[in-house]
């Protein structure tokens, strides 16, 4: 389950990168179209805005919820998944609020980096927990073997 956790985190991070790419693509498409004299309306916006909306309002929130479920099942990375879900909810709120208060769009852009960072840090933390657990188990097994050998020597004397 830890590997599933890591994969979901990496998918969320990739979605944030996609978000940045499609919003930049759409912005340049609008600048290009209006520079050539085209008029834009809600009916002919670039497809990147639609992709940005779907990924940001549906895909990332659903993945964040799935990550929390996986974290609870695996009993690992719960704190990171909760913080990530909170950051995603803030991101969605900022996205909707930025239409009325465009200045919030700056915070929306910055918070995207928070979502990206939390996803990758969470993946790394859970991955490090796996290695630590394996190392701890190996050390415990070696310690147990040494203890058994010492006991056997003590019994033979």
Image (cartoon, grey):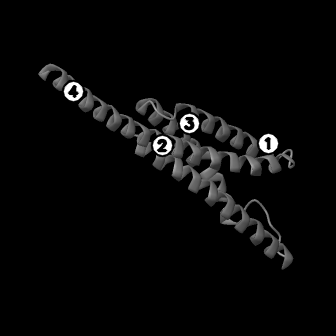
Q: Earlier in the sequence, mark 4 or mark 3?
A: 3
Taking the spot 46% from the left edge, 30% from the top edge, the residue there is 72
Give residue 81's mark.
3
- Mark 3 touches mark 1? (CB < 8 Å): no
Q: Earlier in the sequence, mark 4 or mark 1?
A: 1
Q: Secondary structure at mark 1?
A: helix
Q: Is residue 44 visible?
A: no
Measured from the top left, where is residue 103 in percent x and y? 87, 48
Q: Earlier in the sequence, mark 1 or mark 2?
A: 1
Give residue 128's mark.
2
Q: CA distance from mark 2 to mark 4?
A: 30 Å
- Give the vertical position of 141 relative to 116 (above or below): above
Q: CA distance from mark 1 to mark 2?
A: 37 Å
Taking the spot 46% from the left edge, 44% from the top edge, the residue there is 127
Pointer 1: what residue? 97
Q: Is residue 144 visible?
A: yes
Q: Secondary structure at mark 4?
A: helix
Please name which of the two marks, 3 or 1, marks the residue nearer to the observer. Answer: 3
Give residue 148's mark.
4
Left or right: 125, with 115 as reference point: left
């Amino acid at each position: 389950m830890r590997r599933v956790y890591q994969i979901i985190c990496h998918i969320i991070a990739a979605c944030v990168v996609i978000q940045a790419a499609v919003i930049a693509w759409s912005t340049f498409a609008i600048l290009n179209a209006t520079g050539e004299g085209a008029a834009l309306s809600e009916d002919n916006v670039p497809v990147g805005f639609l992709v940005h909306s779907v990924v940001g309002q549906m895909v990332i929130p659903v993945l964040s919820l799935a990550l929390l479920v996986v974290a609870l099942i695996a009993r690992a990375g719960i704190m990171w998944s909760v913080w990530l879900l909170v950051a995603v909810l803030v991101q969605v709120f900022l996205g909707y609020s930025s239409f009325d208060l465009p200045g919030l769009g700056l915070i929306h852009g910055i918070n995207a980096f928070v979502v990206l960072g939390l996803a990758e840090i969470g993946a790394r933390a859970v991955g490090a927990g796996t290695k630590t657990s394996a190392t701890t188990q190996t050390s415990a097994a070696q310690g147990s073997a040494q203890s058994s050998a010492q006991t056997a020597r003590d019994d033979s004397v």
